Image (cartoon, rainbow, N blue to C red):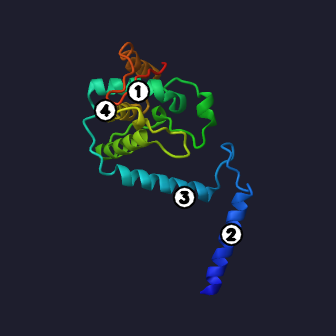
Amino acid sequence: MKIIVSLLSALLLLIIIALGSGAYNIAATEKHWGITEKIIEWVRESSIEAHAKNLQVPALDGKELIAGGAEHYNAMCTICHLAPGMEPTELSIGLYPQAPIFHQREPITDSAKKLEHARAYFWVIKNGLKMTAMPAWGQSHDDDAIWGVVAFVLKMGKMTPEQYENFVSATKGHGHGHGEGSHGHEHEH
């Protein structure tokens, strides 16, 4: 038993020395090792599932909710997640891991999957994700605004540039408010 503990201690010390020496390249231009990526993905997905599983999803089909979500998405999300017809931005190109491009995904038609995605999207949008550049929008936006973004993102699967522009142009002139707890700032469109 002492030999196993000694070997594990020596291995841990070697790992600490290797990581502390800069041997592991943390640059965003250098991809993770395959095993590291799998572990990070497993931890991320498990955490989101555990924290989002009991969220109560409101009705997400209201026109005002979706319009508000389109406005917020257009103002806050396109720089990383892009929009239909939009070329990649300097920021989106440099992200690692890459941000999901929602309009390129297949539409979610299964109601149970849609509910599962709605919970996960809400939790991520509200709380952000460490080491991904995904901000915690819950710090500056109320739950209704976040559910609006969720409703819009769920509609984005295979959305055309014309459909996107119709959603966004329908919100012009309404202002980008944040509801209660607003910091009173506007985002540029």
Precedes in sequence: disc 4 or disc 1: 4
Q: Nearer the viewer, residue 91 or 180?
A: 180
Q: Position of residue 149 (x, y in %)?
A: 38, 32
Residue under label 2 = 13
Residue under label 3 = 39
Identify the element where label 3 is drawn: helix
Q: Nearer the viewer, residue 182 or 189?
A: 182
Which mark is nearer the camera, 4 or 1?
Answer: 1
Which mark is nearer the camera, 2 or 3?
Answer: 2
Precedes in sequence: disc 2 or disc 4: 2
Which mark is nearer the camera, 2 or 4?
Answer: 2
- CA neighbours of label 3 inside 10 A, class few (<14), some (14 to 19), many (20+): few
Establish if 38 lies above or below 115.
below
Precedes in sequence: disc 1 or disc 2: 2
Q: Residue 144 got which mark?
A: 4
Q: Residue at x 30, y 47 (%)?
A: 55
Do the CB atoms of the residues marked 3 and 1 lie less than 8 Å apart? no
User: Distance from label 3 to label 1 (Cα)?
Assistant: 37 Å
Q: Amino acid at mark 1?
A: His
Q: Position of residue 1 (x, y in %)?
A: 59, 87
User: Distance from label 3 to label 4 (Cα)?
Assistant: 33 Å
Q: Amino acid at mark 4?
A: Asp
Residue under label 1 = 183
Identify the element where label 4 is drawn: helix
Q: Seen in the image, is 29 located left or right of residue 137?
A: right
Do the CB atoms of the residues marked 1 and 2 lie less than 8 Å apart? no
Number of residue marks: 4
